[in-house]
Image (spheres, rainbow, N blue to C red):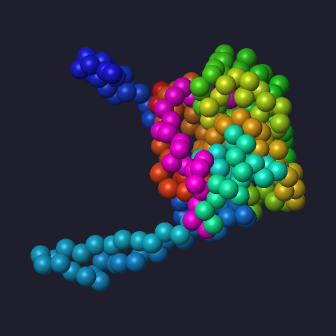
């Protein structure tokens, strides 16, 4: 536990840090996986509907969304393979009908405050944006480490830049159903598991490499089911890459949806 001197030193350090916002805004019409419902927001109460004594009124909204909307993190119970979730749990048994998960839900994910590392694979390949369907391999991650002079360590948050967030305003292109999307392949998943990474993310809806009109997924089961590594999707890594900030304090605070399979987040990098 920090004493008063330790708190003062920590506050002084944080006051000098630059804060990078890695989350994307939520709005109606934004790109969302075709497997999930669209985001909707409507005012349930508008200014002037009710006016309190003294003239005050208020507005508030109803939001309809999936937990896997915009920048979000996956709970370990989000994915199963051959009927099993992380730790060998029976996928059917941990469900509560339509009321969420009994185990491996998002409330089991603690606040994540750890060292973060950005590996800029797009820059490694001399590209602003990697092409759809490009597989980021273990060799790519190792080469990006060498190029940037960093090393991914146990307990880190590993963020992989593909540049794909540049397509965010174009819903069809960002989804990549006709082109595929870039992202880590099975070899990259094994690499980061061997390094002991606790959470990993990139800019796309699917995190892992996808091919056009191909629904198969191998990296999600490898990370969430086999290794217990959380996945973050739809990150904005452009400012970090522009400033060549490759090591930072990573802060990610999932909302505590009881039974939830994931949570929208607004992650931060402090450097």
Q: Residue at x 64, y 45 (%)?
A: 76
Q: Is residue 107 visible?
A: yes
Q: Residue at x 67, y 25 (%)?
A: 196
Q: Which of 161 and 138 is in front in this view?
A: 138
Question: Residue 69: x and y, percent?
Answer: 60, 58
Horizontal side, residue 40 vs residue 17: left or right = right
Answer above or below: position of 100 versus 145: below
Q: Residue at x 23, y 20 (%)?
A: 4
Horizontal side, residue 48 vs residue 109: left or right = left
Is-magenta flag for residue 73? Answer: no
Horizontal side, residue 238 vs residue 204: left or right = left
Q: Quadrant of residue 70?
A: bottom right
Question: Residue 116: x and y, percent?
Answer: 57, 28
Q: Which of 28 and 92 is in front in this view?
A: 92
Residue at far bottom of view:
49
Residue at far left of view:
54
Query: Which stretch appears magenta?
Result: 98-119
Q: Is residue 164 visible?
A: no
Question: Residue 101: x and y, percent?
Answer: 60, 56
Answer above or below: position of 242 versus 134: above
Question: Residue 264: x and y, percent?
Answer: 54, 53
The N terminus - image quarter: top left
Answer above or below: position of 198 versus 267: above
């Amino acid at each position: 536990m920090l004493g008063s001197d330790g708190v003062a030193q920590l506050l002084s350090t944080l006051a000098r840090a630059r804060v990078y916002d890695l989350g994307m805004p939520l709005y109606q019409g934004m790109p969302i996986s075709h497997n999930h419902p669209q985001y909707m927001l409507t005012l349930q109460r508008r200014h002037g509907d009710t006016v309190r004594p003294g003239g005050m009124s208020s507005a508030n909204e109803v939001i309809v969304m999936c937990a896997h909307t915009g920048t979000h993190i996956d709970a370990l119970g989000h994915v199963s393979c051959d009927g099993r979730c992380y730790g060998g749990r029976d996928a059917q048994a941990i469900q509560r009908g339509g009321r969420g998960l009994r185990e491996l839900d998002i409330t089991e994910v603690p606040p994540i405050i750890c060292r973060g590392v950005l590996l800029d694979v797009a820059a490694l390949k001399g590209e602003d944006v990697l092409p759809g369907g490009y597989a980021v391999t273990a060799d790519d991650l190792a080469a990006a480490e060498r190029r940037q002079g960093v090393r991914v360590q146990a307990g880190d948050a590993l963020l992989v830049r593909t540049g794909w967030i540049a397509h965010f305003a174009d819903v069809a292109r960002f989804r990549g159903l006709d082109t595929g999307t870039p992202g880590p392949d099975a070899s990259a998943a094994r690499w980061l598991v061997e390094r002991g990474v606790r959470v990993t993310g990139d800019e796309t809806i699917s995190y892992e490499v996808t091919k056009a009109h191909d629904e198969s997924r191998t990296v999600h089961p490898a990370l969430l089911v086999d290794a217990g590594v959380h996945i973050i999707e739809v990150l904005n890594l452009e400012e970090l890459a522009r400033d060549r900030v490759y090591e930072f304090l990573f802060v990610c605070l999932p909302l505590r949806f009881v039974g939830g399979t994931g949570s929208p987040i607004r992650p931060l990098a402090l450097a």
